[in-house]
Amino acid sequence: MNKEQKAAQAFARKWAGRGEEKQESQIFWMELLQKVLGVEHPTDLVKFEERVRLSHTSFIDIMIPSTHTMIEQKSYKKELDEPIKQSDGTLLKPFEQAKRYSAALPYSERPRWIVICNFRQFDLYDMERPNDAPTRVELADFQKDYACLKVIVDRQSTRIQKEMDLSREAGTLVGKIYDALLPAYGPEPTAQDYQDLNKLIVRLVFCFYAEDADLFGKKDMFHDYLASFMPEHFRTGLMELFKVLDQKPEERDRFLEDRLKAFPYVNGSLFTETIPVPPINEATRRLILEDGCGFDWSQISPTIFGAIFESSLNPETRRRGGMHYTSIENIHKVIDPLFLDDYKAQYEAAMQETNDKKRIQKLKELQDALASGKYFDPACGSGNFLTESYLSLRRLENDILREVLMGKSGTGVLGMDFGESTESDYIKVSIQQFYGIEINDFAVAVCKTALWIAEAQMFQETEEIIHKDMDFLPLHTNSNIHEGNALRMDWKEVVVPADNVKIMGNPPFVGARMQNDVQKKDLLSVCIDSDGEPVKRGKFLDYVSGWYFKAARYIAGTKITAAFVSTNSICQGEQVPILWENLQKNYHIHICFCYRTFVWDSEAQEKAHVHCVIIGFSAFDYPKKKIYASDIAQEVSYINGFLLNAPDCYIQRLSSPLCDVPRMSNGNRAYDGNHLILTPEEKDNLLKKDPSAQNFIKPYFMGRDLLQNKPRYVIWLYHQAPAEIRKHPLIMERVKAVREMRLNAKGASTQKAAATPTLFQTICQPTRPYLAFPRVSSQNRRYIPITFLDEDTICGDKLIIVPEATLYHFGILMSNVHNAWMRVVTGRLKSDYEYSTNIYNNFPWPRPTPAQQAKIEQTAQGILDARALYPDSSLADLYDEVLMPKELRDAHRKNDRAVMEAYGFWGRLNTESDCVAELMKMYQSLVEESEKQKR
């Protein structure tokens, strides 16, 4: 048991069976933060009783601003799942109370983490995933689970923050130098000019860094050399220097002047190509000498600087390519479970060995393992995944060297006498182990430079450990970063497949509907089965799917593991069977670990905010599968294409429901050029001029109209006599406009509909009250708001309808069970839910007893009754998670329980993911049943 575990055990023993909210909360948390979570000065970290203004003044129990954490503390006897009466009379669960506080805070102060605690339990909520079940930590198991709470105190170190700040400043400076040099290429620079300028910038940055990191061997050497040239000779001086930096000392002109002769040979191909340098004016000269050479480049983070460097020069190109820059924190979400956690565990195991010789032997074996791996990013961009992987492995190697050199005693008794050895005798991890493919030539150059800078920084750290100066220059040629289209290249020619290869990266994010012709052809060229035949409906996949197919073929028959950051849509809706069923059946792919949907932020100046997943996969059955939610890992037996601990479940396209329930259909499709659809103002104007047209006008809802309770109106001429229509000239004008619009349309079906311009193109209007779904609904709602409409209210095609629905069907569809199913299998429009008939048709319905069905009908009516208490509030108002009325929330709780009881889930399942896993088992049984009946 380590020191932290002992502290957790002692803390749990002390606080067992006690705890009053008012008297002991602060003592409890101060002890927890200091004695268990290792916060040296917790009073500097936390704020108690922070004021928040609701309709009255309330107080937040505890805030930790630096980690965006809110803590709501309750007494020992309070249950965390039970509503508590608030000062305004409402009943709220503690988490609902905390969310209400959060909504009242300025946006920048809202919590990422919410902790609800009653002295014996901690519920940790990740507000990036507000609908997920919390991570629950029991005080009784605190010794085992306390680490789950570390996220609330995990502030980035001062060193990392400093590196990030310097890297951003450096990126801004690079942009200034770029903007200053560009006009020198003329009013209309060519593509070649831009390439030359990019290469020039890369060389300048390398020289800036080399000078500050003492790689050139003398302080201010680069600055002093350049300062000797006036503007008219500045370009010549640079070109002469670039030529010398690529020459070995023995190959240089023997009459070379001393100031050039003093520069070392760089190699690495960075200065090999001769590039033109444009004229440099005085302002640009001063910018390079004062700002460029005056900035301290030695402390930048090469991991994020590469991305910032590139985005500073060409952000438009990066956005068009669909690529997003990555924070160091998010890179580790990929590389830690892929390989780094395992290496660190081996290091910890070696360090537990008490026998000195055995410990040193295990550490040396680990160092050899680090040096034997190959790390491949087939969409490497500016190299941030490769660079951070290299830095992480070298830091671990330095830890090994430190231990091997000094031993546990710190006396050096076990130390290695390096003598006259070169760096290759003790540094084994090399940038030669890192491979990449990138389509952008400039990004390739930036990636190589970032790796060289990372290598230089780690050399300096190793020098401090072994107390020996090493020669970093000349560089080793890094030819492992390849320029090309990764979906068209043969990856085996970049790095030969072997069990020691790790594949990682952040391939381009381009949705199926957003791909250009070239990208679509790239995608379809690799979306093929094991026989080389195109997979069905491959055109509906996101662009990132191409990397999964390429990787699947590459890793076949090996122990290679891969992990990609991806748009979350590849694990939602129709893409799941297209992608994952094909990968499993054709290439035997297993998902090893995953991060469920979270917001992917970047360190670039123009940040990308994308809803992403991380998926690790292999062609062998990985032994310990893990699902990460809120950065906390749960070991599971299986991970399916929806990223659930459940059997494979490939939702098929069905034209009718799998269960015996009413059919669902789309609403009426107008395709009328908005000539038959009226705004309220247009309706009023028309009736003012022609009051008798009232009989032809009916309320009309699309999805947003329904949610906001703001109907439009429609001229509805279904089953109306032509003679009656002709009596209304204003309506006739609109009918003629519909006909003209349809005749001029491109589609044959629309042109055909010109023959019936009085009607919508597609009509499926019910003749009795019907249930209406908005096709798109906000992800922030726990329930998709659905409602009954009467037969005289016309539904547009942004609604989905169930004409024969009863109160029972309404109750099931409004339940947390159905909404949990929807959240997993639905497609998304951006991040919002996009409901479809296919979700409904595949949904496994319960088989309730008559009593259970009657109970659901009763609770369903309760929901309608609760809504009716607020006639002036729209569905959007009523289903706002912060504003939802108490009566409606209570009605939903009762309905949720009634539906859970009908399924047999009540008291047995605790999380949405557990619920969906059970539904998927039911779905599989229903499919098998259906197939048997067909036979």
Image (cartoon, rainbow, N blue to C red):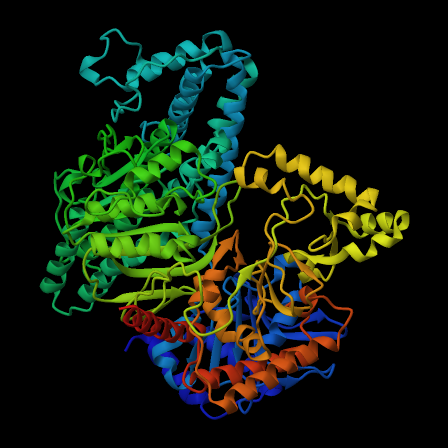
Q: Could you say which is closer to the camera, residue 907 or residue 445? A: 907
Q: Is residue 127 visible?
A: yes
Say above or below: 132 vs 221. Answer: below
Say above or below: 183 vs 156. Answer: above
Q: Could you say which is closer to the camera, residue 145 or residue 279? A: 145
- 338 left or right of 573? left
Residue at 50% from the left image edge and 33% from the top image edge: 315
* Image position, residue 918 (x, y; %): 37, 76
* Image position, residue 382 (x, y; %): 38, 36
Q: Could you say which is closer to the camera, residue 455 or residue 262? A: 455
Q: Could you say which is closer to the camera, residue 789 or residue 187? A: 789
- 382 left or right of 730? left
**Number of numbered discs:** 0
* Image position, residue 658 (x, y; %): 41, 69
Residue at 16% from the left image edge and 58% from the top image edge: 363
The C terminus appears in which quarter of the rendering?
bottom left
* Image position, residue 450 (x, y; %): 35, 36
Residue at 41% from the left image edge and 28% from the top image edge: 205
Residue at 49% from the left image edge and 13% from the top image edge: 185
Q: Quadrant of residue 857?
A: bottom right
Q: Quadrant of residue 74?
A: bottom right
Say above or below: 358 vs 682. Answer: below
The N terminus appears in which quarter of the rendering?
bottom left
Q: Is residue 259 visible?
A: no
